[in-house]
Image (tube, grey):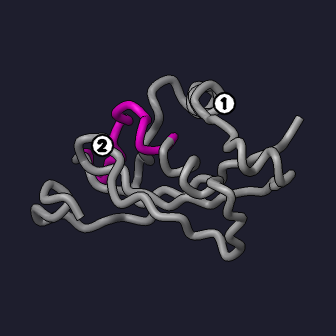
């Protein structure tokens, strides 16, 4: 964990106001689709699937503690690519509890489909 995640700071599973990607969910989906690079090895091997990513949006809106939590591991670079895209995200609007910014756990599915 990053130091700024530990300053008297618990990680909430739900907050009164949940964290938000700049521009909302539609903007986040657009960001993912524009930045996701399907791994060549996965294309060649026709590997598709959903990678579940867990991360914390800290009280400053930064993404921390990125982790793959999918029970099924697809391999061929899908998990690494999903993590890379999450790492690349801009600062979010942090979650709030009692009017104060807090760290909040977030789970996001990243879908890989060969067109």
Residue at (38%, 36%) from the top-left corner? 92
* Local SS, label 2: loop
Residue at (57%, 70%) from the top-left corner? 69
Residue at (62%, 35%) from the top-left corner? 36
Question: In the image, residue 73 lies at what x, y percent?
Answer: 68, 70
Residue at (75%, 47%) from the top-left corner? 112
* Local SS, label 1: helix
- Earlier residue among tags 2 and 1: 1
Q: Residues within 10 Å of mark 1 (few under 14, many from 20)?
A: few
Q: Could you say which disc has been placed on residue 33 in the image?
A: 1
Compare residues 113 and 5 and report the one nearer the observer: 113
Q: On the picture, is 88 further left or further right than 110?
A: left
Q: Main secondary structure of the magenta part?
A: loop
Q: Which quarter of the figure is the C terminus placed in?
A: top right
Q: On the picture, is 60 further left or further right than 92?
A: left
Mark 2 = which residue?
Answer: 62
Q: On the picture, is 80 further left or further right than 75?
A: left
Question: In the image, residue 53 lies at what x, y percent?
Answer: 55, 58
Q: On the picture, is 31 further left or further right than 62?
A: right
């Amino acid at each position: 964990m990053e130091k700024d995640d530990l300053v008297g700071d618990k990680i909430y599973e739900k907050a009164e106001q949940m964290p938000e990607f700049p521009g909302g969910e539609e903007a986040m989906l657009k960001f993912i689709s524009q930045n996701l690079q399907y791994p060549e090895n996965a294309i060649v091997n026709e590997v598709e699937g959903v990678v579940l990513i867990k991360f914390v949006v800290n009280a400053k809106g930064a993404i921390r503690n990125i982790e793959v939590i999918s029970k099924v591991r697809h391999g061929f670079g899908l998990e690494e690519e999903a993590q890379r895209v999450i790492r690349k995200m801009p600062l979010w609007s942090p979650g709030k509890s009692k009017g104060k910014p807090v760290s909040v756990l977030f789970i996001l599915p990243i879908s890989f489909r060969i067109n």
